[in-house]
Structure formats: structure tokens, C-alpha cells
Amino acid sequence: MDECQRILGGPPFEKRMEPFTVLIKKSGPVPERVCMIHPEIAKSAVELLADLNISRSDTMRQFLDQCEAKPHMVKLIKNLLTRRKKGEHGKDKFSRLIIDIYENQDFHQALSVLEMASDTFRKNPIFPQTTARLYYLEVRDYNSAEEWAQEAITRAQNNSYVADTLGQIHKNNLLRKAKKQRDVEEIAKKGYSAFKHVERKAEREEGPEKKDTLGVVSTPDSFNNRGLFGFIQVAKIVFEKLGKTRAAASYPNLQKEVKDKFDFFEWYLTYSKPDMKTFEPDYFWRDVAVCYKHYTGKTAAESTSFPGLLNCLDHGLFSSKGSRARFEETENDLQRIRDELKTTYKKNVNDVKVAERYILSNITLSNKEPDSASLSPVKELQKVIRKFLCEVECRSPEFYLLVLLLFWPEEPDEVKQEEDVEVKQEPELEATEEDGSQDKTWEDVNTDEDQDTGGEADNDPDPDPQAMVTLMKEEFERAKYAKYLRGRYLLPLFFLGKGSGLSRWIHKSKLDVVVERMVLDKLKAQTDKRNKKMRMFHDVWIKGEVWHHPRIRAMLLPVQVEPCNSSTTSQRHEEVFVCVGEKKIKAKVEEKVYGPPLSTMLYYLGFTIQGPVVFRVGAPHSEQ
């Protein structure tokens, strides 16, 4: 109120506003603020002023001229000039006010407001950053845009998001203007350099929880992947403008750079998504996969990396990242992949990464063909991974995920059922001459010969699941997954099902098949299906409809849980003990409660790349 009086001057503010009292309200209390009672009334008032030749830009410039750089005023002006509304297809280019000034007046009026804000708040980087975006997005003045982007970087030298704007300017210039080879190469060089700077700055940033840590200079809520993705986009554009030979020479070790960034985004998009309601834009994976094919000659669908194997089961689903990228996806020959990885493993029995992929190929095959005679027995796969458990080395979260899947406790009747099934499966791996295992003992290396002859490994106790959960969480931090995936929703990769052995681990794609059928059934009588399909897909998961479908309830095995009152439990995430026989294993609880809060609860167990997670589901009334 006092701020309004100071800006307006003249009679007391309350007296001056008497004719309009019914249209305004006070909010606050500290500092006390005045605002219109409804956005539509505010919009109508602005339009009426514009009809009286009091333009939006004049009003904003007068406001900037009178205001002081107090924190709450800076926040207000920042919101007015830079907050971009998020719609169904992403964020608007600019704030609503800048868009209105640009559309109802012209570019120069919008520019003058942003330049005045930049001059008024000389330490704030967001106003010159937005000015740079206006230059390159609306009039393609790349030189002026570059100058303003450099000014923004000067004001926030450690902020990767501010640095990204310069890379976007060069990428846009490369895509829209550069035609001659020399221009393409020169602008590409600038683009590569800018995005590598973004990448390095993002690596130095930490999450908000480390805000007060010595040496931490920037703490955004999420990891900034734009340096990595922007580099990929520049490489893709250069290839398409110059061809493979000249493109490969545009940056040192470019093929390796592209391969490394493809590997990053393959697991990044397999293990997480921005939030429960959205995926990355459709073009995101398309650009990554196309660039990868340009420089390596391989398709993303051919990948048999750990995340690549997990993706195999998604092929053909409209929710898969390949389908959303508009790729033609065919089903992978999981039997062939599994056989090839078995052969590779037999030649590399000491390579833990090869062992992980071999084991996972059996689990993915069991999800597609549960009765396949080629599936390796669970006990054989347990022996494969035991060898690496005996070694005193740090392992990956993927490694401990497999340990938990293979050694998760079973009830006695489940164990007997598993043994009956395994009688029909193929014999265990035999040692090969190449690995030289005939002369080694169990203590030297847990070879297939030891396994076949029933060495000491058969008497070893199963690894403690709670210890494996603890190690998995520690490796999630050490492998920097916690850094890169902060602020994102971790996707469940597997769920505990009602089967035994490998068949009790249900890949998420089997649930997605049912969800997609639910969505398509709902869409039969509707138009504009494309825009609604993905929104409805997310809604089925978010609203918990997925858990009450008969087919999914027939797949999943409810688990027993007990409260966990550990003093180390994060205040942000509730934890419970999952009780299996005499074992109690900690698991994070999914924050959403799927069902009426007072209903009988069911608990389903899933696994993310961080560890076990329990989904708390309200049981239908018929079961209460």
C-alpha cells in the first residue's frame, strides 16, 4: 500500500481508489499488496487503458522508472517480464506481458521495456537473457542477441541455464541462416564451444540440499541437460548440412562425443522422466537417436546396453520414446539377443558389465516368453553374479538391482514352484578353454566349472537384501545418478509379480500395454485423439486406475509392510519395511496414495534405479 502511494503520489491511495474499491483487494500481509480481484478484470482494465492510448509498454516503463530495487519489487517485475506460462506443448516463448506488448504494439516496444529492466537491475541476469532471446527468436538478429547473452553470462558466470542462451543463439543461427561451408563450420565451432561451457557449468552445480556447502556456486532444482543436448543438436545440423566427412572434422573426437552423449540420454530417459505428468518433447529422443545414427551408423533400437535391453520391451507401445520420436519400431528378437550375450559372457566371464547384460537379457526374455526353454535357470544366474559379490569393488546401481531381483526372498511354496520350473530349463554354463578357468579355484574366480561341480558357492548364504538396498542407494549417489536425476520422477523398472523365479519380475511395459488399451478404449468415441492420448495415459497412472484393472491385479503380488521409524528417514520421502518371511527390507513409499485415504490398503513393490519403492493402493470397496 505504501509502495503504491509512493509511486502514484498525490492524494492518499485509499481515497484515490474509492471509485474502484469493489475491483481491488489487499493481499500480504508483509509487505501489504494491492491487486485486482480477478485476472479477467485486470485484463479488461489493461485493454481499456490501451483503448485510451495508455499502452502496456508505457505503463511498464513508468512503473520501472518509479520502483525501487527491493526484493519483492524485483520478484514482481521478474514475473511480469520473464515468467513463461507452461502449456500443453511446452512453455510460451516469453511472458504474457511481453507477448501482449509485441503483438499489440511492436517488437521495439517490447525490446525497450526489457532493455530498461536490464539497465534498472544491473546485477540480475534474467533481463539481458530475455532480451537476447527476443532478438534471436523474433527478428533473428544474432549479433545483437549474442551481445546481450554475453552480458547475462557476465552477471551470472556460474549459472549453466544463463550460459545456455548463447548456445541456443548459435544453434538457431546455424540452422536458419548458415548456408556456405565456411559459415557452417565457423558458427558450429561457436555452438560446440558454448554448449561445452554449459556442460561444464552444469557439472559444477549441485542440488538445493547443498546450498550451504563450501564451494557450491549454483543450486538449481534439476540437472541442466541442455549443454549435452544442445551439442547433439549442433552435431546433427552440421552433419545434415556438410555430410559425414566434413562434419566429423568440425570438432575433435566428434564421434566419441556423440556416442557418450547418446549413452547418457539412453539411461537418463529410461530411468526417469521430468515428472509424473510428462515425458520429454517428442523431438528430444529423435534428435539424439538420429545424430547417433549419423555418426555411428547404428540405430538406437539395436542397442543391447543395460538401458537398451530394458527399452526392448517397450517397442511398439505408443508411449515408448521411439514411438513418440516417430520411429518405426519392430519387436526385437530377444531370444537371439540373449543367446548372443550368453556367448559374449562365456568369452568374458570376468567382465561385470557383460555379466549384467547377460542376466538382464534372461529377465527381459522371461517377460516376453516366460516358457522359453532357453532361459537360464535362476540358480545359474545367481552363481554368475555371486562371483562379483565376492570381489571388494564398488558396483553400479544396475548391479545391485540384479542382485535384488535374483535373490529377493521367496516364500517356501514359491521356492518349490521355482525348482519345478527350472527342471525344464537348459543346463548351466560350462567353462571354456579361453577363460582358463580349469586351473582356478573358487577363491580365485567363481567360474562356470565351479558352478557345474557344486563348489563352495553352493553353500554360500544368499546376500542380505537390506545390505544390497543400502549399497544400491550408496552407488546411486556415487555414480552421480542422484546428481543427474534430481528433481525428476524415477520410473519403476520392474514390479513384483505372482510368479516364481525370473517370471515373478514384471517389466513396466506389461502394465503399460494394459494402460494403453484402457486409453484407446476411452478414445474410441472422441476426436482430437493425438493430443489427448498421452495426457490420458499419464492420468491412468496418476489417478491410480492402473492398480485396479483386473489384468494388472492378476499380475502383481501384494506385499506386507510395517512402519519404519528410523531416525535417518528423509522427511521428504516416507519409508516402510517390506516383510518377506523373516526378512524386513526398507523401501521408499510412492508419495501418491492411490485410492480413498480411509480404504483398506494394498501395497505393490516396484524397483527404480535407486532401489525398492512401494505403491500404496486403496483397495476396491468390494474387498474392504
Image: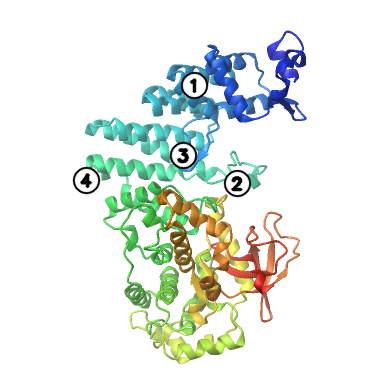
Residue drawn at (35%, 53%), measured in percent from left and top? 259
Residue drawn at (52%, 66%), measured in percent from left and top? 395
- Mark 4 = which residue? 245
**Is 556 rendered above or below residue 252?**
below
Look at the numbered discs 3 and 2 and tell me whether their residues touch, using CB distance below 8 Å: no
Looking at the rendered structure, the kind of residue marked 4 is: Thr
- Mark 3 = which residue? 198
Residue 111 x %, y %: 47, 19
**Is 372 rendered above or below residue 231?**
below
Residue drawn at (34%, 53%), measured in percent from left and top? 326
Q: Which element is circle 1 on? A: helix
Residue 206 x %, y %: 58, 45
- Measured in 3D between alpha carbons, the distance from the residue under mark 2 to the one under mark 4, in whole angstroms, is 40 Å
Looking at the rendered structure, the kind of residue marked 1 is: Ile
Q: Nearer the viewer, residue 404 or 495?
A: 495
State whether residue 249 appears in this view.
no
**Is 193 rendered above or below residue 395?**
above
Q: Which mark is residue 207?
A: 2
- Mark 1 = which residue? 101
